[in-house]
Image (cartoon, rainbow, N blue to C red):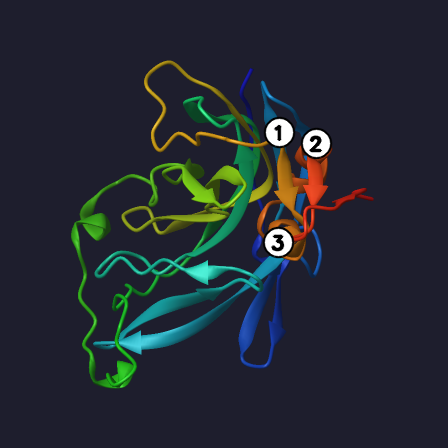
């Protein structure tokens, strides 16, 4: 059952840090924890650490620049430039999957309009010379992005099929002038009806040891999933995963 706890926090949550305001959520660092990982479900818990808000002037009006350590900015031109977190998980080779929000604990803050993204600029483009543009999201009385988390299309990384989960720990309602901040989010990736996109036709029950560091860095549930497979070197020798 989805449980939503919403509380409005006072402005005392803020502290000044090098010209920016630090909004503490759970601590200095964001934590993504695998609570459960098996063939029928992967359960993830996200505890954002915090973020900074810095004010800038656009056409004589104050706007907020939001930055979160360990997160990347959304690059949708003309939409609020908000941070997102990403974690990749191993999923079944030939199963369609979907994401569900299991628990969401949030609080709401009053805020200046968030600066719009200038999009994904080439390296030879000076961002300072690209004007801001305000797209349709600024006229809608809804939160942007519209969901707290979403799945990418499935991809194949040599020995595994995976998806990337995007988490949106800060969402913005430009009309109301508010931020919805996630304090704790629990999501599950579970089997779904329908034809699986990009299925993986596995031809062997082993994985290559040379790719272990890549898998360990990429997939947050790698340790739980890797025990199902033998590990081989390029020479074909088995080794034990610890």
> From what the image shows, is residue 238 above or below residue 104?
below
Circles 1 and 2: CB atoms closer than 8 Å: yes
| Residue in the picture at 46% in, 46% down | 168
Front-most of residues 115 and 150 = 150
- Secondary structure of the residue carrying tag 3 is helix
Q: Nearer the viewer, mark 3 or mark 1?
A: 3
Q: Work out which quarter of the rendered image holds the N terminus and state it.
A: top right
The residue to which callout 2 is attached is 35
Q: Residues within 10 Å of mark 3 (few under 14, many from 20)?
A: some
Check residue 211 in the rendering and tell me which mark sits there, or answer none: 3
Please tell me which residue lies in front, 139 or 210: 210
Quadrant showing the C terminus? top right
> Which numbered circle lies on residue 43?
1
Residue at 69% in and 45% down: 232
Q: Callout 2: helix, strand or loop?
A: strand
The CA distance from mark 1 to mark 2 is 5 Å
């Amino acid at each position: 059952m989805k449980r939503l706890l919403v509380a409005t926090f006072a402005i005392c949550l803020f502290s000044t840090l090098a010209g920016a305001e630090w909004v503490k959520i759970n601590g200095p660092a964001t934590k993504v924890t695998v609570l459960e990982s098996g063939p029928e479900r992967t359960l993830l818990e996200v505890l954002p650490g915090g973020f900074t808000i810095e004010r800038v002037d656009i056409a004589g009006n104050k706007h907020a620049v939001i930055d979160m350590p360990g997160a990347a900015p959304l690059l949708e031109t003309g939409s609020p430039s908000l941070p997102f977190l990403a974690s990749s998980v191993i999923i079944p080779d030939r199963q369609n999957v979907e994401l569900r929000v299991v628990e969401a604990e949030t609080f709401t803050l009053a805020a200046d309009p968030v600066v719009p993204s200038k999009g994904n600029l080439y390296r030879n483009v000076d961002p300072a010379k690209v004007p801001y543009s305000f797209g349709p999201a600024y006229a809608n009385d809804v939160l942007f992005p519209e969901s707290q988390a979403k799945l990418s299309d499935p991809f194949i990384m040599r020995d595994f099929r995976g998806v990337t989960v995007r988490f949106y720990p800060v969402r913005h309602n430009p009309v109301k002038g508010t931020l919805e901040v996630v304090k704790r989010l629990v999501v599950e990736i579970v089997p779904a009806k329908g034809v699986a996109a990009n299925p993986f036709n596995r031809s062997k029950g082993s994985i290559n040891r040379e790719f272990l560091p890549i898998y360990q860095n990429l997939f947050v549930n790698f340790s739980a999933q890797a025990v199902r497979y033998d590990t081989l070197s390029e020479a074909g020798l088995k080794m034990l995963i610890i």
